[in-house]
């Protein structure tokens, strides 16, 4: 839905619901796609969203429920009765029903779970970690024997038409349900009806186990252009499948989480989250940034005598801090991106570090030359503040500033490259290494380098 239309719809729905015209509001959203309505509910005032959701038919409400974020889902289900909640969950696929069940309080889970049509499937999915292949897989699938004919397999598809909505491939299993291969729908349609499944199936089947991390499962689907990925247990028995819509959800969620961490947020902030939850996610990083800034201020204070002897050095402090932070962020962002995509080349510390150092050397040289030229030109133009700079020497000052900038960019690139790799090796999300952490650490390092070089190369000649 275009943003302009969504804005107009939100305004209209708010007016209708505030005036108590629920029937008119329901008529207004009739025919709307469930994904669009989920977005609308996420942007309505919480009370209006709850009122509108309660009025929706159970099957449609269930589809909407599967599209909204955790915080809003919990709020919408808070006052839903047991009967309606059961109908909502029965209308969902097992994986979506398990996700919704996991958001409910334990007493409500105990009451509702036994009443579900797929209670065993949902209960089985809930035991898996939500960020594993087992946690995102669906139990609904079609599995046939290699001894069956195409005609028999087609009948099996028809028998499962109500439970398996999205069908991409037919899995082939033996009598113990161990996975042997798969047959695509296209292959079934083009094969003779009396052909054996074992003769037309693909044996080179990609699989993951239930404990495989969801990001790794999605990377396998992306690498091999899969739209349905088989999930097996430790005995290679087929237990579920991850479909392309699940993969897209994981990609979006992981991208949002990494972006938030790059910005100094814990990675779980959602549009409908409460003010308290948002504050808890941001405040620690702001505290860290403030502590780093205070430490950087201490560094400047330590070199107060250096600045007093040549006050013009203070003009370069913002340049050094900004370039140190920017260079570090660039290197760390590329590293985090490579590690997140599962690129094995990114985890080669020496190879990656050498390349980043080479890039930093070229960039640092170019920026240093530009800064030196600017310093010389400013002196030639006879800026007023230079007369108060304590006998500044333009060439030496330009050389000192340029060398400082070069060294700072080199160090910042090295730090930005190695920290994500070290965290990755330690089993910590490397996205935590970016944002405020890299910026603050490189600010401090950059200031120390600048003042040490200034005190060594410039002050003795002033």
Image (spheres, helix red, strand yellow):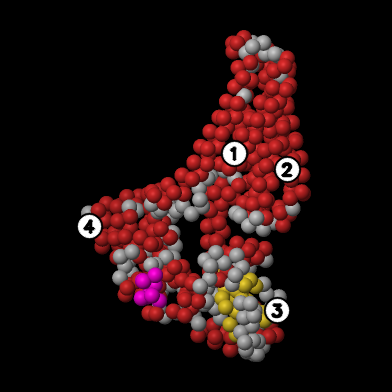
Pick the front one: 221 or 16: 221
Report the side of 165 relative to 366 (left or right): left
The reply to whether discs 2 and 4 touch (Cβ–Cβ < 8 Å) is: no
Tell us which disc is closer to us: 4 or 1. 1
The answer to which of marks 1 and 3 sits earlier in the sequence is: 3
Magenta stretch: helix, strand or loop mostly: helix
Q: Is residue 312 at all visible to an observer of this figure?
A: no
Q: Give the residue at mark 4.
A: 20
Q: Give the residue at mark 2.
A: 356
Pick the front one: 90 or 258: 258
Magenta region, residue range: 106-113
Q: Residue at x 69, y 56 (%)?
A: 343
Tell us which disc is closer to us: 2 or 4. 2
Image location of residue 192, percent across then percent down: 65, 86
Q: Secondary structure at mark 1?
A: helix
Please identify the quarter of the rendering in which residue 187 is found.
bottom right
Q: Residue at x 44, y 59 (%)?
A: 69
Please identify the quarter of the rendering in which residue 209 is found.
bottom right
Q: Give the residue at mark 3.
A: 203
- Does residue 306 show up magenta in the picture? no
The answer to which of marks 2 and 4 sits earlier in the sequence is: 4
Q: Give the residue at mark 1.
A: 439
Q: Secondary structure at mark 3?
A: loop
Q: How many marks?
A: 4
The reply to whether discs 2 and 3 touch (Cβ–Cβ < 8 Å) is: no
- Label 2 vs label 3: CA separation? 43 Å
């Amino acid at each position: 839905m275009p943003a302009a239309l969504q804005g107009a719809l939100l305004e209209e729905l708010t007016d209708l619901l505030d005036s108590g015209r629920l029937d008119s509001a329901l008529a207004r959203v009739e025919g709307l796609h469930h994904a669009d309505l989920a977005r609308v509910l996420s942007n309505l005032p919480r009370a209006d969203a709850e009122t509108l959701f309660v009025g929706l038919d159970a099957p449609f409400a269930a589809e909407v429920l599967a599209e909204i974020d955790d915080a809003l889902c919990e709020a919408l289900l808070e006052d839903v009765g047991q009967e309606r909640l059961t109908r909502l969950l029965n209308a969902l696929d097992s994986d979506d029903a398990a996700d919704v069940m996991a958001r409910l309080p334990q007493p409500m889970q105990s009451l509702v779970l036994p009443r579900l049509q797929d209670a065993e499937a949902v209960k089985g999915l809930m035991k898996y970690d939500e960020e594993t292949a087992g946690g995102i897989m669906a139990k609904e699938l079609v599995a046939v024997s290699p001894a069956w004919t195409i005609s028999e397999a087609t009948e099996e598809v028809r028998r499962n038409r109500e439970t398996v909505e999205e069908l991409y491939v037919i899995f082939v299993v033996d009598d113990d349900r161990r996975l042997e291969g798969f047959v695509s729908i296209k292959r079934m349609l083009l094969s003779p009806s009396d052909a054996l499944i074992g003769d037309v199936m693909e044996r080179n089947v990609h699989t993951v186990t239930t404990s495989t991390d969801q990001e790794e499962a999605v990377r396998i689907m992306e690498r091999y252009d899969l739209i349905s990925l088989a999930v097996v247990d430790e005995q290679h028995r087929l237990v579920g499948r991850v479909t392309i819509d699940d993969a897209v959800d994981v990609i979006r969620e992981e991208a949002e989480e990494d972006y938030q961490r790059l910005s100094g947020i814990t990675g779980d902030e959602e549009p409908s989250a409460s003010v308290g939850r948002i504050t808890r996610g941001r405040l620690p990083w702001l505290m860290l940034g403030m502590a780093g800034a205070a430490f950087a201020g201490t560094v400047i204070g330590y070199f107060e005598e250096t600045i007093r002897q040549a006050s013009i050095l203070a003009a370069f402090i913002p340049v050094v801090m900004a370039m140190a932070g920017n260079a570090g962020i660039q290197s760390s962002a590329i590293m985090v991106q490579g590690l997140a995509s599962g690129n094995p080349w990114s985890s080669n510390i020496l190879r990656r570090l050498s390349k980043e150092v080479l890039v930093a050397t070229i960039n640092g040289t170019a920026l240093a030359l530009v800064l030196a030229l600017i310093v010389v030109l400013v002196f030639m133009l006879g800026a007023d503040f230079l007369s108060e700079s304590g006998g500044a020497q333009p060439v030496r000052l330009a050389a000192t500033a340029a060398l400082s900038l070069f060294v700072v960019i080199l160090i910042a690139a090295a730090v930005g490259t190695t920290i994500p790799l070290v965290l990755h090796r330690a089993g910590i999300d490397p996205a935590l290494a970016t944002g405020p952490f890299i910026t603050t650490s490189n600010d401090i390092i950059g200031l120390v380098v600048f003042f040490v070089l200034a005190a060594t190369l410039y002050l003795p000649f002033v």
